Amino acid sequence: MANEPWLERMDWASRRLEDENSSHAWGFFGFTVIWNLFSWGIAYLFLRQGDASGIARFFVLIFPGVGAILLVSVIYILLRRQRYGVPVLELATLPAPVGRALAGVVRTRAVFDPAGGFVVKLQCIHRTVTGSGKNRSTHEETVWEGARTIPGASRDASGIAIPIAILIPSDARETDRTNSRDQILWRLLISAAVEGIDFRTQYEVPVFRTAESATPFTPEELARFGP
């Protein structure tokens, strides 16, 4: 697989990618539960003493306040998952060639037709990691972003299918995961304004320079992949 690094990940090799937000939801839920248990427990024990100053009380209550915000976020994520299920991206291009386009279809079990269509964004991210242990820090910088609006989706027996097609510049950097502390990754985000709970999904996608990268677009392809 040295010459085909996009086959090293099982989801890429299968051309079937699950929404990252959904896959991380339970981990975020667990973190939120632990945060609230500790922060509310410590706040309760501290306030029971009754002799704390107003400033000290305010400082201690900051942490349960953060926990409440996290809990609201978790509830929203779980409600969104209940409504839309786990959206899946089926890749038509494996990999998506630099200088060409990323294409595929996103399937979700919910049936809806947003008035503003679906906003599709493709981002090239430079991720760096500094420090280690408790001092470990991860920073992401968007070095390129392309966007377009897909007017609608088609219906099928399982829900709706959102067609994805977006251009990749010829001078873009390809996916590079060889150094865990200094990576180039590509992220696809699809969103739509929907009454109640907005639709939002994202995926890390394989973008590499291949022999196809040197093939110029035809007018028909530009019309298909353009804004």
Image: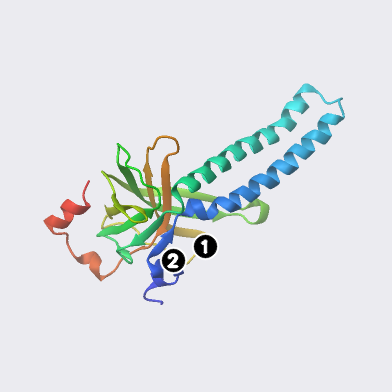
Residue type at numbered disc 2 = Asp
Q: Is residue 44 something one can see in this rendering?
A: yes
Identify whether 208 is placed above or below 154.
below
> Residue visible at 42% across and 45% down?
200
Residue 137, visible in the rendered structure: no
Which is more toward the observer, 171 or 71?
71
| 72 sits to left or right of 150 | right
Where is mark 1, residue-wise? 180
Assign a secondary structure to mark 2. Answer: helix
Which amino acid lies under the numbered mark 1 shown in the image of this protein? Ser
How far from the left and from the top, in percent, is residue 168? 28, 55
Closer to viewer: mark 2 or mark 1? 2
Q: Which mark is residue 144?
A: none
Residue 132 quadrant: bottom right
Relative to 118, 40 lies left or right: right
* In the displayed structure image, the side of residue 37 where residue 145 appears, left or right: left
Q: Characterize the local packing of mark 1: few (<14), some (14-19) or many (20 or more) Cα atoms within 10 angstroms.
A: few
The residue lying at 42 percent from left, 49 percent from top is: 201
**Separation (CA) of disc 2 from disc 1:** 19 Å
Q: Residues within 10 Å of mark 2 (few under 14, many from 20)?
A: some
* Residue displayed at 42% across by 55% down: 203
Q: Nearer the viewer, residue 90 or 47?
A: 90
Residue 110 image offset from top left, x and y in percent:
40, 48
Look at mark 2 in the image and give the residue it sits on.
Answer: 11
Q: Residue furthest top?
A: 54
Q: Is residue 220 above or below residue 63?
A: below
